[in-house]
Amino acid sequence: MRKYFTYITLALILSPALLADSFSLSFSQNMTNNLFQNRYAEKDQLSTIGYYLDKTLNRFSLYAEGSYSYLFENPNLTYYVQDAGADYLYPLNEKSAFYFSLAGRGAFYRSDYSDFNYLSASLFAAFKSYFSQTSIFKSNYSFEYKNYRDSVYDFLSNALMLSLDRYFQTKTTLKGEIDWGYKYFLHPYIYEGEVPIDGHRYFMGRKGKGNPSYQGQYQYQTLTQTEGQGIQVFSISGLIAQGLGNTVGLRFSGMRQWVISGQNPFSFIEEFYAVENPSYDRFSWDGFQLGSQLTFLLPWNIQMKLGYTVSEKKFPGIESLDLEGNPLEITRKDKRNHIEVRAEKNFSRFSVILSYSYVNNSSNDLYFDWNGHFLSLGIEWNIPLGVNQ
Amino acid sequence: MMRRAELVLLLAFLLISILSYGQKTQHFYNVDKEITVEGTIQEIIMEPRYKETSPFLVILLEEKKTGELYQVEISPVWFFDHDFHKGENLTVKGSLYSSDGKSLNIIAREVQCRGETLFLRDKHGFPNWRGGKGLTKKRGKGKGKLY
C-alpha cells in the first residue's frame, strides 16, 4: 500500500511538469562572511536548489515554484519555500493592457526560525498604456496577507503605484513615480509572558545568535494590548536612463519616502539572511535612496551589471539600543552603501550567474553597524516542454 | 519482481506522457531562417499572433542599413516587463518569416537594448519566458538573497 502511495505521489508531482510549457531547475551556491548582518559577523554558506514550471491556458498562466535552501554552519535555519499562482493578461487595445496575478506562498523553516513560518496570499493588478509612442503610463496595486506561525507578525498590506516616463531622441529616458503604501499588523501586541526588559518591553526571537548581550532573549516587543497597528508611507522617485549604443546603458535613480502615519510596532529590527524580516521592508522607513547602474555587454555576450546604492533610513517606532541592550532614547537610523557586480552568461539551455556584493551599514544602534561580503554562483537549466511558437 | 514491473509501468507512463505531449505541438520557429537586424523602433503595439495565447508585443523596426521595415514579435509577457519606446535602437536576432509573401516578420530570439540582452527563446526557438509574467518575482525580498 505504501509503495503505491509513493508511485502515485511521484506521478502527481511529475505530471504537472510533463504538461507544463516550461520547466526549469536551478542551483546556487552562496557565501557570506556576515550571515546575520550585524557587528558580530558569522560566516556561512548556503546551497539552494529549486524548480519552476508553468502552463499557459489561453490568457491564463499557471505556475509553481519551489526552493530548498540548506545552511552549512546553521543547519537549523534550513528552509523550503513554495509558490504557486495564476496570471491573466487582458489587452484593452493595441496600446494598453491589464495584468492580474493571484499568488500564494508558504515558507517553512527548521527549528531555529520556525516562528517565522508563514502562509501568504497576494493579489497584484497592473495597467500599462502608451500615451504616445515615446511615453508610457503605468499603475499597479498590490495586496498581501501573511499569516505567521507566531501570529504577532501577521499583517495585511496595500500599495499603489503610478508612473509616467518619456523617451527623448537623445536616447534619454526620464521617469517619475509616486507610491503609496499601508501595512497593518493585525495583532502585534499579544502578551507572551516573557521576561520584561523594562515596564512595557519584552524581546523575543533570536535566541542569542551572534550577540551575547541578547542571549536567551527574543527580538520583538510585545505588550499587553490586543489592537492592531498600521504604518502608512508615501514616496516620490525619479529615474534618468541613458542609452549609449545598444551595448551600454547607464541609469541614475532617486527616491524619497515619508512615513505619513503610524510607526513600526516592534521594538527593534534585525536583518536575517534566511528570514524575511516582517518589520524591515518598504513600509518600515522614512528617508531616501540614491542608485546608479551601468549595464554593458562583454565579448561572448556576457552581460555585466555594476551598481552602487546609498540610502539613509530612519525607522519610526524603533528605538536604538546600546550593546548591552539599554535604550538610547533615539530612533534607529541607518546609512547604507551597497556595491554590486553581476555577470550573466546565457547558453542554449542554461544560464550561469555570478554575483558579488559588498554592503556597509552604519547605524546609531551599534549592533547594526556592520559590513559584509556576499558571493553567489548560480546555474539555471531550462527544459522546454511546450510549443516553440 | 512485482516491484520492478510497477517501476517499468511508471517509467512507461512518464515516457508516453512526454512523447504524446510533443505530438500535440506545431512548429513555428525556423532555425534555418535566422537573421540579425539592427534598427530603430518605429511603432509598438500588442496584437494577437497565435491561437489561444495572450496578444504579443510587436515592434515595428526600421533596419538601419536598408530602411526596410520588420515586424518583430517579442512575446506575450514583455509588454509589462520592458518599456520600449519609439526611437530606441535595437539589435534583434530571430527567425524570419512572411505570412503573405510581402511583409517581413521576425520571431525574436534575442533582443539587445541599452546594454542588456533579453533572451526570449533558446537556440531551437523554444520560449524562455515564463508564466507568472515575471512581475510577481519583482515584489518582496527574494528568498536565497543574502542581504
Image (cartoon, coloured by chain):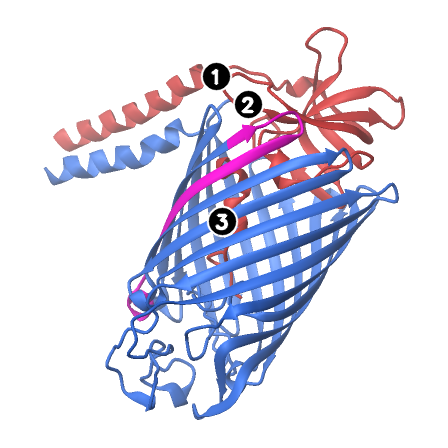
Q: Which residue is mark 1?
A: B25
Q: Which residue is mark 2?
A: A388
Which chain's colour is blue?
A
Query: Seen from this angle, which residue lies furthest top?
Result: B101
Q: Quadrant of the N terminus of chain B?
A: top left
Q: Is residue A12 visible?
A: yes
Q: CA distance from mark 3 to mark 2?
A: 33 Å
Q: Amino acid at mark 2?
A: Asn
The answer to whether the residue labelled 1 contacts the one labelled 3, judged by CB atoms less than 8 Å apart, is no
Q: Which residues are magenta?
A: A89-115
Q: CA distance from mark 2 to mark 1?
A: 8 Å
Name the mark on residue B10: none
Residue A44 lies in the magenta stretch: no
What percent of the width, then of the height, locates residue A348? 60, 35
What percent of the width, then of the height, locates residue A351? 58, 44
As rendered, which of A286 and B97 lies closer to the eye? A286
Pointer 2 indicates a residue of which chain? A
Query: Residue A356 occupies which quadrant of the picture?
Result: bottom right
- Circles 2 and 1 on the same chain: no
Seen at 74% across and 30% down, the residue is B92
